[in-house]
Image (cartoon, rainbow, N blue to C red):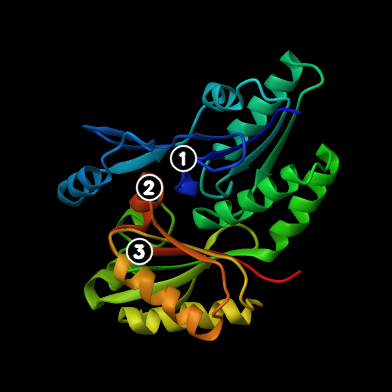
Amino acid sequence: MNRRIVMDSSCNIFTMENVNFSTVPLKIITDQKEFVDDPNLDLDEMLSYLASYKGRSGTSCPNIQDWLNAFGDAEEIFALTITSTLSGCHNSALQAKELYESEHPGRRVCCLDTLSAGPELVVIAEKLRELIQSGKNFEQIESEIRSYMTHTHLIFTLESLNNMAQNGRVSPLVAKACGLLGIRIVGRASDEGTLQPLHKSRGMAKALKLMFSEMKKRGYQGGKVRIVHCQNETAALDFQSLIKTEFPDSDITVNTMTALCSFYAESGGLMIGYETQA
């Protein structure tokens, strides 16, 4: 059985070992330039350009054909998308599913709105890979992954909310206050898939402690953690150490964000996807 996992590029990865895998790129757009979130992008160049750019910027989601191209010739596809409250990715994927299944009778596509972004998608995809490798059928995999998704979460800390505010994700007044006062925001992906601010923090050390406290409050007991950062590896490694001190056997990785998450998190941002026990 030819099965494939497909994710949009908000997941921050372009490859996944031991499974048929592909990604669909989002784009960062200004009046002058377009940046495609794929492995060919020079991320430092994009961030440098955006830091000096004075005009408006935004993002563009994949179209139906982009998803169809990523589906390839797989017989069973599991598509994971960024939360539908922030992007049209999920709607495009659903339309691609309908077209793909109508053109290829017998083939099946499961579209999963993660109600999240970034590293939480990776946590879910890794569980999908495990289910695919177990040999379970399509219905079993879909049922089990939807159940598992109720035990995955996203928490983040940001030191700039400029792009969030410019694209209607947070209040401009909140963004301005954070910029002027040097306050970091700690937030999470809500159960409805929105970005929910939880705390305001002066300084990274306090923000890391607040994030870890929120993780434990939601039931984290040493499971999988996937950390991504935008030009802030030091803080990412400090957060890994904070978790390891209390949960030394926890499965943690640290990686860099790609274009879409870097655009919204901006320099200094951290995003953490993690699982809690069922």
Quarter of the picture holding the N terminus: top right
Residue that numbered label 2 is attached to = 258
Q: Amino acid at mark 3?
A: Gly
Q: Position of residue 205 (x, y in %)?
A: 35, 83
Q: Residue at x 25, y 69 (%)?
A: 179
Q: Label 1's element?
A: loop
* Residue 78 falls in image quadrant: top right
Given this view, does label 3 or label 1 mark the residue nearer the observer? 1
Please name whichever residue, 216 or 234, is drawn nearer the observer in this view of the structure.
Answer: 234
Could you tell me how many numbered marks the image carries? 3
Badge 1 or badge 2: first in the primary sequence: 1
| Dot 1 amino acid type | Phe
Closer to the chain start, of discs 3 and 1, is 1
Disc 3/disc 2 C-alpha distance (Å): 12 Å
> Visible in this render: residue 114?
no
Graded by Cα atoms within 10 Å as few (under 14), some (14 to 19) or many (20 or more), the crowding at tag 3 reads: many
The residue identified by callout 3 is: 269
Element class at badge 2: loop
The residue at the point 72 percent across, 14 percent down is: 103
Of the two numbered discs 1 and 2 in the rendering, the one whose residue sits closer to the viewer: 1
Q: Residue at x 72, y 62 (%)?
A: 150
Residue at (59, 23) in percent of width and height:
68
Per the image, the residue denoted by label 1 is 14
Q: Are marks 1 and 2 in contact (CB under 8 Å)?
A: yes
Is 192 on the left or on the right of 203, as rendered? right
Horizontal and vertical percent for residue 30?
27, 37
Element marked by disc 3: loop
Residue 88, percent across and down?
54, 38
Cα distance, mark 3 to mark 1?
Answer: 20 Å
Res. 156 in view? yes
Lower position in the chain sequence, tag 3 or tag 2: 2
Q: Give the quadrant of residue 39.
A: top left
